[in-house]
Amino acid sequence: RKDLVKEPIKLESAVRLYGNKRNDSVIAGSHISVRTKSFYTEMVGEFDTNAAKITKSDVGFSWLLDQTQQPGDTRNTSGNLEVSLAMRNVTALFDSSPIERTPSTNGLSEEDPKLSISFYKHSVVPRKVLVAVDSRYALISNYVDIGFEATMNPKQFLEEGNNNSQFPLEMSLGASWQINK
């Protein structure tokens, strides 16, 4: 029914195939992405033709929750919340060789699979400023961004389970505040 559809769904997709030379290797790759208004996904894969091995296999999903002001809304801020789920080195999950135990500062090596979930909040905070040459107010926006990410090695979690009390989990937190005058 037409009264149930408020606006049509817009779907964008892209497929990119590429090849390049890195050092002594020839790399062939693909990048596939699909985007709608509030959902984005991408898959990236690269293959080293000389070594005959996959060098990159990444998958990511992202949801954008629109929180802009609606008519009659009394909130002072507007902005978006983005939730992402990414898996790096997916093919390493299916590799039967043991987990790389190379020392690293956070317990996660570059060759191991990494599962990460992240949250990113972008807020626009309007404020009124008195203009010096006029008795009217000017509306100026400040921008506040806060992000959080947690990353783990799912292969190590599946192999060791609860046997390891030193399970490596990397957490990151970031924030910025842009003040305009």
Image: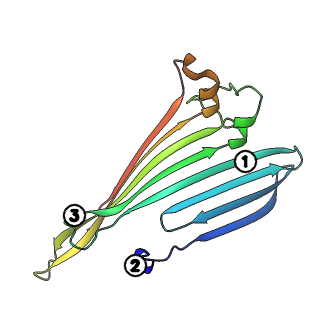
Q: Is residue 91 left or right of residue 68?
A: right
> What residue is shown at x 66% (from left), y 55% (from top)?
43
Q: Amino acid at mark 3?
A: Asn
As drawn, 139 above or below 82: below
**Which numbered disc flags the more N-terminal residue, 2 or 1?**
2
Residue annotated with mark 2: 3
- The mark that comes first in sequence, 3 or 2, is 2
Picture quadrant of residue 113: top right
Asked whether disc 3 touches disc 2, contact meaning CB atoms under 8 Å apart, the reply is: no
The quarter of the picture where the N terminus appears is bottom left
| SS category of the residue bearing label 1 | strand
The residue tagged 3 is 76
Tell me the residue at 45%/60% (across/down): 64
Front residue of this view, candidates 13 and 151: 13
Q: Amino acid at mark 2?
A: Asp
Q: How is the image coloured?
A: rainbow
The amino acid type of the residue labelled 1 equals Lys
Around disc 1, counting alpha carbons within 10 Å, would you say few (fewer than 14), some (14 to 19), or many (20 or more)?
Answer: some
Q: What separation in Å lies between label 3 and label 2 (alpha carbons)?
A: 31 Å
Residue located at (57% from left, 47% from top): 86
Instruction: State the separation of the CA atoms marked 2 and 1.
Output: 45 Å
Rendered location of residue 94, percent (x, y): 73, 36
Side of 130 where 16 appears, left or right: right
Name the residue carrying label 1. Answer: 56
Badge 2: residue crowd in 10 Å (few <14, some 14–19, many ≥20): few
